[in-house]
Amino acid sequence: MDGILLVNKEKGVTSRDVVNKISKQFKTKKVGHAGTLDPLATGLLIICINRATKIVEIITGYEKEYIATVKLGIKTDTGDLEGNIIEEKTTKVNKQQTNNKIDSFQKKYMQKVPLYSAVRVDGKKLYEYARNNEEVELPEREVEIKKIELLEFDEENQTFSFKTTVSKGTYIRSLVEDIAEELNTVGTMTDLIRTKQGEYKIEDAKILDDIEKSDAKEIITGLSQFKKIIIDEESIKSGKIIENNYTEEKVLFVNEKNEPLAIYKVYEKDNTKMKPWKVFKLE
């Protein structure tokens, strides 16, 4: 079985737990997920099986949509409710203030990676520094908040929720803390749902216990961003470098049945040529 499974991950389950269960259920070790969801988070987790694992990198790069819930006035060491409270602050902001600050985040900006993350610094994961109580300078990455809107606001409890579409590598926990800082207070994420990734939607996902083979989507559905070229499989079977007759940096070659054969990209040593990037061997 090759394909893409859309799992509606439940709270308290790790992304690795999902991968392990799918691996056991479908009797294959070639299983990967396209973007971690923390145990606290729920929603869309994309799982790739067998040949589809070749496009994990591609799907991981798709923009993602989330709905996050925030509690103002408290800050934790993990940025969510699973951590220890490290700061409390009396706060009183209103809906208009919050809406204005949220709107201001529709932009590109340099975001600090959270301490409790798997990003490596000097060969060691950041959460390892945290667990060992070692100081480390948190790296910053450019992220893009493509869309963001306030959904609900509770002035009495100083909580709110927002929906956002973000680029790859954006940490919603960090975004929450950054919004709180702009409101001259602190805040932590209390809930997070991933609702969309690329063209895949949570409405089409199933909880882990209900996943079946028939739910697998074809590999081609994860490659909609590429220009498709129908080609004879023999023309690229050897994986040789070919002439670049295309305007795109990457192109997808398919056969007459619309089955993916390979993705080629511009050859860095000679932009008049193209070389194979991802090759999909047909059974």
Image: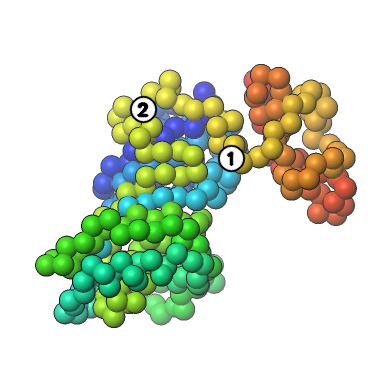
**Residue identified by numbered label 1:** 55
Residue type highlighted by circle 1: Ile
**Where residue 261 is drawn, which disc sits there?**
none
Pointer 2 local density, CA inside 10 Å: few below 14, some 14–19, many at least 20 = some
Of residues 58 and 204, the one drawn nearer to the viewer in this rendering: 204
Disc 2 + disc 1, Cβ < 8 Å: no
Q: Quadrant of residue 250?
A: top right
Q: Residue at x 42, y 61 (%)?
A: 171
Q: Residue furthest left?
A: 156
Q: Residue at x 71, y 19 (%)?
A: 256
Q: Residue at x 21, y 61 (%)?
A: 153
Q: Position of residue 119 (x, y in %)?
A: 48, 63
Question: Mark 2 vs mark 1: which is more N-terminal?
Answer: 1
Of residues 278 and 155, the one drawn nearer to the viewer in this rendering: 155
Mark 2–mark 1 Cα distance, whole angstroms, equals 20 Å
Q: Quadrant of the C terminus?
A: top right
Q: Is residue 265 left or right of residue 51?
A: right
Q: Position of residue 95 (x, y in %)?
A: 23, 67
Of residues 260 and 149, the one drawn nearer to the viewer in this rendering: 149
Above or below, 112 against 55 in this view is: below
In this figure, which colouring scheme has been used for the structure? Answer: rainbow
**Residue identified by numbered label 2:** 211
Q: Position of residue 99 (x, y in %)?
A: 30, 66
Q: Residue furthest front?
A: 96
Label 1, secondary structure: give it.
helix
Pointer 1 local density, CA inside 10 Å: few below 14, some 14–19, many at least 20 = many
Above or below, 133 against 283 in this view is: below
Say if residue 224 shows up in the picture: yes
Residue type highlighted by circle 2: Ile
Q: Quadrant of residue 172?
A: bottom left
Label 2, secondary structure: give it.
loop
Q: Is residue 32 left or right of residue 25?
A: right
